[in-house]
């Protein structure tokens, strides 16, 4: 399928999606988000793909929801179209998704990155929830996901002042998993995705589901969920292979089932 607002490519079992509205710093308009959902649907259904990387440009991962598209909305139009809800597609992908962020990840851009499983940041990355400066508040999960990731104090600071934080502060506060030199960002993110893609796909998908469960439930319920899933892993071919390979001191060859 031909896309106008994103670029897609595959590198073996890894899909790379590049947000591509350079003139608007990858502002997230409805056309871009529809294309992103379509691409994710396709990679989710493609058995050859086992990990996905979402990235932007050197200057901007994404500078937020498209303010020019949004400015004239009314309460009723936003309500009736259920504005933003379709973006949640990103957080419902069952395969692993890594955000590779360089430059601005602001507003909806920061929220999009947080919908991914983890964020690898270039040393040029700048994160923020500047919606307050526009007279609104985050609408794609910013007040919720950011607070869970960095805690109340820093989330309040960022959401109430609209200030940006750099990559070092984002790593210190737990928003990003690691910071890499900007010119190595794609290489590092794809390498991480390739590593994950080489592992047992059912184990990877269930690990993702279990970690996400930690955000949705109590510790006791989460532990019970993990235990049930852990027991179920003994039904997979990959568990047999993974443990046999360890005992035989050889690399495991996973069949992803
Ligand atoms: N929406 C629409 N267009 C945007 C945009 C956005 N979020 N961010 C940048 N652009 C456009 C600019 O309007 C400009 O277009 P023109 O050349 O046609 O004027 C172009 O991208 C380049 O931007 P700047 O000239 O502003 O670039 P800069 O380097 O001087 O500044 C910036 C960069 C600090 C990121 C600045 O562009 C900026 O503050 N952008 C807005 C950030 C923002 O407020 N994001 C939150 C949006 S609301 C939201 O996301 C709601 C939600 O929770 C879902």
Image (tube, grey):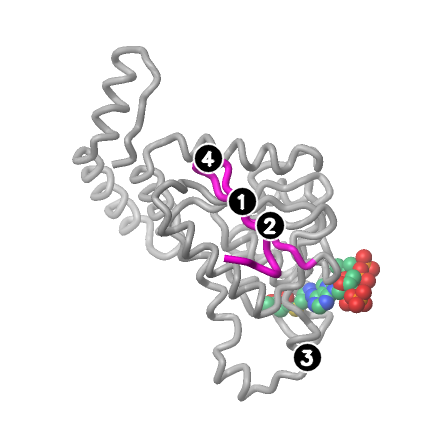
* Residue 250 in which image quadrant: top left
Picture layout, residue 187 above or below residue 252: below
Q: Is residue 63 left or right of residue 208?
A: right
Q: Residue at 66% across / 33% down in the picture?
A: 184
Q: Assess whether residue 5 is covered by the magenta stretch.
A: yes
Q: Is residue 156 left or right of residue 15?
A: right
Q: Residues within 10 Å of mark 2 (few under 14, many from 20)?
A: many
Residue 242 point in image, percent of width and height:
28, 24
Res 138 visible: no
Spatial CA distance of label 4 from label 1 is 10 Å
Instruction: Note whether ligand 1 is within 8 Å of mark 2.
Output: no
Residue 62 point in image, percent of width and height:
65, 57
Q: Residues within 10 Å of mark 1 (few under 14, many from 20)?
A: few
Q: Assess whether residue 68 is covered by the magenta stretch.
A: no
Mark 2 touches mark 3? (CB < 8 Å): no
* Residue placed under numbered mark 3 in the picture: 71
* Residue placed under numbered mark 2 in the picture: 18
Q: Nearer the viewer, residue 167 or 16?
A: 16
Q: Which residues are magenta?
A: 1-21
């Amino acid at each position: 399928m031909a896309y106008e607002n994103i670029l897609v490519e595959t590198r073996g079992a890894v899909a790379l999606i590049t947000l591509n509205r350079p003139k608007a710093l990858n502002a997230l308009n409805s056309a871009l988000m529809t294309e992103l959902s379509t691409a994710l649907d396709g990679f989710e259904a493609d058995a050859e793909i086992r990990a996905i990387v979402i990235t932007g440009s050197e200057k901007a991962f994404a500078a937020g929801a498209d303010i020019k598209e949004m400015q004239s909305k009314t309460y009723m139009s936003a309500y009736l179209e259920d504005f933003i809800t379709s973006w949640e597609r990103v957080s419902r992908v069952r395969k692993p998704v890594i955000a590779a962020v360089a430059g601005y990840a602001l507003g909806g851009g920061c929220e999009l990155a947080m919908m991914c499983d983890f964020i690898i940041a270039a040393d040029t990355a700048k994160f923020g929830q500047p919606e307050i400066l526009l007279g609104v508040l985050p609408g794609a999960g910013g007040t919720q996901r950011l607070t869970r990731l960095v805690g109340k104090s820093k989330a309040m600071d960022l959401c109430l002042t609209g200030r940006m934080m750099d990559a070092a502060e984002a790593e210190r506060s737990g928003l990003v998993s690691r910071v890499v030199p900007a010119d190595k960002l794609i290489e590092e993110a794809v390498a991480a995705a390739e590593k994950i893609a080489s592992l047992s796909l059912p184990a990877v998908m269930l690990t993702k589901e279990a970690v996400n469960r930690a955000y949705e439930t109590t510790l006791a319920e989460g532990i019970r969920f993990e235990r049930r899933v852990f027991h179920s892993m003994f039904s997979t071919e990959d568990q047999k292979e993974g443990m046999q390979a360890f005992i035989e001191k050889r690399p495991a060859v996973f069949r992803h089932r």
